Image: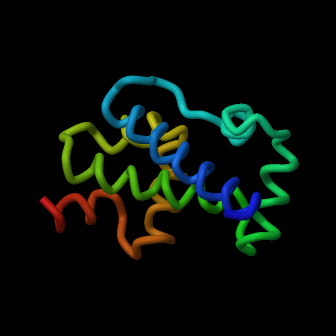
Amino acid sequence: MKRPEKIKATFLSEIDKHLNDLITGKVETMFEIYKFAELLHIHPIHLSTTIKSYTGKSACNFYQTKILESAKILLVNTDKPIQDIAYLLTYDPSNFTKAFKRVTGMTPKQFREQNT
């Protein structure tokens, strides 16, 4: 596996692990991109430029996508208030609703009602 491919794979794996830990309550705070770079033992700029040049998407784009996937899991599998889910995922509730709707085409409330 080439180095950029390995960085991408490890980055995505670490995101999944961190978000799973967040969902299950093992951690209480969200990582920022620099924290993932620390886990990979590389500089945050190197992480960002490698991900962008290898995939055409930013590291933040991948992270935001995974965060919203976690939001879907929380909306369907918990009875946490939507506001609490937003705060857990480091969103202001109104920004969470906007971001969620932009990606899914529905509000978090509509998504929860449709999938529970």
- Indicate the quadrant containing the N terminus: top left, top right, bottom left or bottom right: bottom right
Q: Is residue 27 left or right of residue 44?
A: left
The image's colour scheme reads rainbow
Task: Identify whether 10 is placed above or below 38.
Answer: below
- Indicate the quadrant containing the C terminus: top left, top right, bottom left or bottom right: bottom left
Query: Percent x, y for residue 29?
Result: 52, 26
Q: How many marks?
A: 0
Farthest residue, direction left: 116
Task: Identify whether 36 is placed above or below 11.
Answer: above
Between 26 and 4, the residue placed more toward the observer is 4
Query: Percent x, y for residue 8?
Result: 66, 58
Between 4 and 17, the residue placed more toward the observer is 4
Farthest residue, direction front: 1
Q: Is residue 98 left or right of residue 109?
A: right
Which residue is pictured at 52% across the width and 49% down the height?
13
Residue 35 seen in this snapshot: yes
Which residue is pictured at 40% across the width and 76% down the height?
105
Q: Is residue 29 left or right of residue 2?
A: left
Query: Percent x, y for residue 19?
Result: 45, 41
Residue 72 in which image quadrant = bottom left
Which residue is pictured at 17% across the width and 68% down the height?
114
Which residue is pictured at 45% across the width and 62% down the height?
100
Residue 60 seen in this snapshot: no
